[in-house]
Image: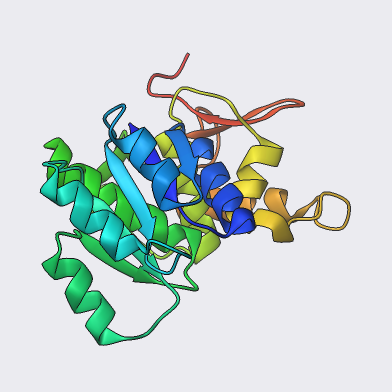
Amino acid sequence: MKILIVDDECSLLKQLQQVFESQRYAVETAMDSEEAYDKLFDAPFDLIILDIMMPGVDGLTVLQKIRKAGIKTPVLMLTAKGDVDDKIRGLDLGADDYLPKPFSSDELMARARALFRRYGGQSDSVLQVYDLKLDTVSRNVTKDGNPIELTPREFSILEFLLYNKNRVVSRFNLAEHVWGDAFDPFSMSNFMDVHIKNLRHKIGDLGHGKIIQSVRGVGYIIKELQE
């Protein structure tokens, strides 16, 4: 999946790029309308994340132009305004969803996944290994049909490991995904161990053949097939 993020705020742009790249999406960025036009009319994208409030030509004008040009790529609009009129105008011009700033990376990812499913033909929002299921939309987790209550961070850890099923996820990348810039590897070094232990307990992941396997000196992995 290839994403174009258009925002004039450099720090936010970099942060969003890192969030999506950590989930293995291909990301390109643009800081103004001209750079956005150059990229949009040069190559196809699977999703456009477009800030409304930009200097010069704003995001609504960019949206209007690309829709008139026949570009049907789903567009998620970002804005710092709480103005309902902006939301209505954006949707009327062809935006597919709308997210006001500030927002959490989890909500942004959830909305992006929903647009991918809607326009990419995916009908299943459930990540599964054995009898453990995680629904990325409803945020429900079940094992053998029984509901499991997870904290937001436990959910985020499990979701990230399931998205990277059969791949080793380093402790640092997992911590960065869950805590973002707030993670301090020096003062929070045992946080991941505590959350993994609690998560394993809640999903009944105990004894031999654990679902969440530790890779010594590296991190964790969820395997489809146990060795």
Counting from the top left corner in percent of width and height, residue 101 is at 46, 73
Figure colour scheme: rainbow
Residue plotted at (32% across, 51% down): 112
Q: Residue furthest top?
A: 227
Find residue 187 and report its image quarter.
bottom right
Q: Which residue lies furthest to the front in this view?
A: 56
Q: On the rendered structure, is 204 left or right of 193?
A: left
Check the image and report above or below for 149 versus 38: below
Counting from the top left corner in percent of width and height, residue 23 is at 47, 38
Q: Which residue lies furthest to the right in this view?
A: 186
192 or 205, which is in the foreground?
A: 192
Residue plotted at (12% across, 69% down): 92
User: Is residue 210 at least partly visible in the picture?
Assistant: yes
**Image quadrant containing the N terminus:** top left
Check the image and report above or below for 93 versus 211: below
Residue plotted at (14% across, 59% down): 94
User: Is residue 141 at least partly visible in the picture?
Assistant: no
Counting from the top left corner in percent of width and height, residue 186 is at 88, 51
